[in-house]
Amino acid sequence: MSGNSMKRALIGHLPAIAPVDHLVHLFGFVMQHRRLPRRRHPLFNDVIHRIKASTEIVDPLRVYVTDKEFVKTFVRDRVGDQHNVPTHTVFRRVDDVDIDLIPDRCVIKPTHASGQIITRKHGEPVDMARIRGWFALNYYRTSRERNYKNLQPKVIVEPLIFNDAEITDYKVFCFQGRPRLIQVDYGRHSRHVRKFYDLDWREQGFGLVYERGSIDFERPANLDRMLQVATRLSQGFSLVRVDMYSDGESVLIGEMTNCPSGAMGVFSPPDGERLASAMIFGDLTDEMLHTQVA
């Protein structure tokens, strides 16, 4: 068993109560960043840690959009169903899982967890045991992100959008209901690269977790519309990341991310965290940040 597997197993056996969750988050933060979370002049990871460790993470709206099926209702009501990735089927019980209901080209993922996905490109065999195993997965037990704690296990199947198995992800960081910073990811299932842009599509000189790579991403033709959609979806949140896809015409929402990188993301160079924080939070004082993030 690897070190990470042992750590997840240990965390999974700890009592499922908020004080323990807080200690797990604090310990993980200190081990990753080699410092305590800042109360004064907080940076990017400090604010996300504050959300994870406060009652804000169990706000009913945050819990609702955490579910990858329910978020589509939220998107439909806020900006219209045309901005949802179509749903092929949802398996609600392990006995419902049926290979005959899974298209040759699709994406399969649990609605109640993060980081789990199967991409089927050309009708290749599907790991049905893995899919059925997702029904026993409780992402909260190992992540201690309490917005996942009471989600019903389900598996959602979606078509490959834009007829492409390797598409570009656009992720818009919004604070106080306004887009502030754009993250672009490509090659998530091969060689993952990530870059950041301001709202005028000027590339920023820092990275987060993944290398920046040499790809020069073109400004989406419908960037203004993408930012309008992100603005409407982020109302009612302090900090949230709106994850979307675009082919230059359509804007499709992938999910709403409450705690990007789980407050564990490492910037490169290290000063990048300060720069990203300034772009997202601006010149808000500590007191103003405290009122915006519970």
Image (cartoon, rainbow, N blue to C red):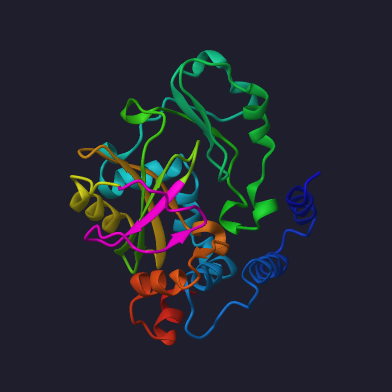
Q: Is residue 263 left or right of residue 183?
A: right
The magenta stretch spans residue 117 = no
Q: In this view, does 96 lie to the left or right of 40?
A: right
Magenta: main secondary structure equals: loop
Q: Where is residue 80 in the image (x, y as percent from the top left)?
A: 26, 42
* Residue placed most toward the observer, 128 or 58: 128
Rendered residue at 80%/54% (across/down)? 10
Pick out the residue farthest to the top: 100
Q: In this view, does 90 lie to the left or right of 247?
A: right
Rendered residue at 28%/62% (across/down)? 198
Count of labels in the image: 0
Q: Is residue 250 left or right of residue 165?
A: left
Which image quadrant: the N terminus?
A: top right
The magenta stretch spans residue 197 = yes
Q: Position of residue 114 (x, y in %)?
A: 56, 46
**Vertical placement of residue 239 versus 143, above or below:** below
Pick out the residue farthest to the front: 214
Q: Where is residue 145 in the image (x, y as percent from the top left)?
A: 60, 58
Magenta residues, start to end: 193-216
**Vertical placement of residue 174 versus 216, above or below:** below
* Residue placed most toward the observer, 64 or 4: 4
**Vertical placement of residue 21 versus 89, above or below:** below
Rendered residue at 31%/43% (across/down)? 76
